[in-house]
Amino acid sequence: MTIVNDAVDAVIVGLGWTGSIMSIELAKAGLKVRALESGPERTNAEHVYPKPADQLGYSVRQKVFAKASKAALTVRHDRSQTALPTRRWGAFKPGDGVGGAGVHWTAVLIRPTPTDLKLKTFADQAYKPGQLQDDLQIQDFPVSYDELEPHFDFFEKVCGASGATGNLRGQIQPGGDPFEGPRSNPYPMPPLQDTLNTTMFAGVAKKMGYHPFPNPSAAVSGPWTNPYGVQLAPCNYCGFCSDYFCLNYSKASPQTTILDAVKRMPNFSYRTDSHVIRVDLHDDRKTAKGVTYIDDKGQEVFQPANIVILASFQFNNVRLMLQSGIGAPYDPATGEGVVGRNYAFLSNGNATLFFKDKNFNPFVSAGPTGQMINDFSPGTFDAAPFGFIGGAKLHSSQAGGAPIGMSLPAGTPSWGAGWKKGIKDWYGHSMKISITTTCMSYRDNYLDLDPTYKDPYGQPLLRMTFDWKQNELKLQQFLRDKVLAIVKELGPDSYTESFLKPDAHWDTTSYISTHNVGGAVMGDTPKDSAINKYLQSWDVHNVFVPGGNAFPQNFQANPTDMLGALSYYSVKAITEQYIKKPGPLVAA
């Protein structure tokens, strides 16, 4: 028998970044809000501090990632193949529990550019008809940079963003990114301290005519109190950011920026170990009446609500929409349907440089410590002669010194005494130059429900059909040449490289990034999008879907700043417009 909870004004599925933002802003507006999180509660005070950082537990054994046994998806390269389920996270690392992936992220907080948000318009102007792949499905975001700028600004204050301003109200500033969109205010905090590798990279980049600037960081460079009254402590450069809780309360996460404030509000509550299996619709299927979840005792529970916010990880948002019949499933054969459309990932690559006479002291760093250049992003250089659209940020980042998996010179044994000697000889004597690229959307890269495999709750797994396209492989080869030119100027004793070959296929086993996007994208019309500019379902108007699912393709900037800005943009429309007059906020 299904248990029925007390009704709420808004139920929020997932309590990571987007769910936390939606929770506090809706609660501030006076709504009775309940969040449902599928994973456990983990707080610094009770579950982390003062336990030492543990690379084996967190990075290798994936302590705070979603369990593949419960949150797997099936993967194939194309429709001719049978998709098989992931047994262990490799290419990406979805989060688990309160805070979601915002717990273990690296904390690079960079905005997309105005061009990134209007990429289809840019492509139509910069490329001749037929010059690009004919299966591209790139789209403009239905919001502009100027519309989102106040929300970028606020989210960066929530996080205590630390960086060097490059464009202040249209005036280019020394030391920052000259290609960024104009900011209404400078970064809240100055950038993190440079390390030896970043100083070397920035010096050579300037010599070559590029424009280096410090990685924009959500690990704060000094003490910070955010707009919610929550305090963050100065980063102590311990080297444990990516894959870890921040032991020092310095890295912005839902726990360190929002949750302590919203938990004190009497009209907010949350329940952990509550796995939502569907959104329940009224008979007319135009509005939702709540959600059904499985609680920690295995019982089915119905949570009535006037507004449903799907704020879980991108994969799960798409899956819940498909399972609940919200929007037409995408069919790559016909191009019709919208839910599952435009899935995109990204590619990366790097060169590792080895110097016998330099000690980079890798433990004295933070996840976002580094310098980068945006000289090869869309609109900052002419990619048309090379036959691709897109770009990348090039960076030298020193994200930590944990030894398991560290790069070693070519010819070093991968195990045993030879590996141990390599670690001893080369620890602290290498630096990386890396790329993080765009990824376009294509007609036959998509998400749907797997017809065979199910999760422990009897629900079909999400199926991913994805492979690299020639556009991205051409981009990789172009960027490889740029990186190796910088390597040559730096003059290491030796180096190794890792870039996609021209005939590469996507490999699920090696980590790339957790920046998955698309599948339920935002747009101007219901013909090619699942949600409108306010992240509201075109089909079920009291369902809103904030997350990476909304991106019509992937840009080279890390997505978290965009996720935060879109969430604030959406919740502003909910509180100022939708609550007063429920219904579609954009005419279909």
Image (spheres, grey):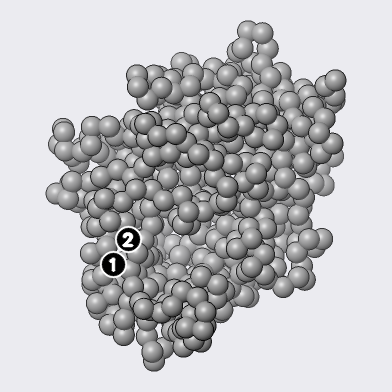
Determine the residue located farthest toward the front in the rendered image: 416
Residue at 66%, 23% in the rendered image: 279
Q: Position of residue 489 (x, y in %)?
A: 25, 78
Relative horizontal placement of residue 272, taking residue 216 as reference (left or right)? right
Left or right relative to 410: residue 546: right
User: Can residue 228 be spotted in the picture?
Assistant: no
Residue topped by disc 2: 499
Q: Is residue 119 above or below residue 561?
A: above
Q: Three-letter amino acid code at disc 1?
A: Val
Q: Horizontally, is 480 left or right of 131 in the view?
A: right
Of badges 1 and 2, nearer the viewer stands 2
Q: Are marks 1 and 2 in contact (CB under 8 Å)?
A: yes
In depth, the one of 169 and 540 nearer the eye is: 540
Relative image position of residue 432 (x, y in whole percent): 40, 72
Pick out the residue farthest to the top.
284
Identity of the residue drawn at 85% across and 20% down: 1
Decide: is 427 above or below 379.
below
In primary-sequence order, the first of circles 1 and 2 is: 1
Query: Residue 483 has which mark?
Result: 1
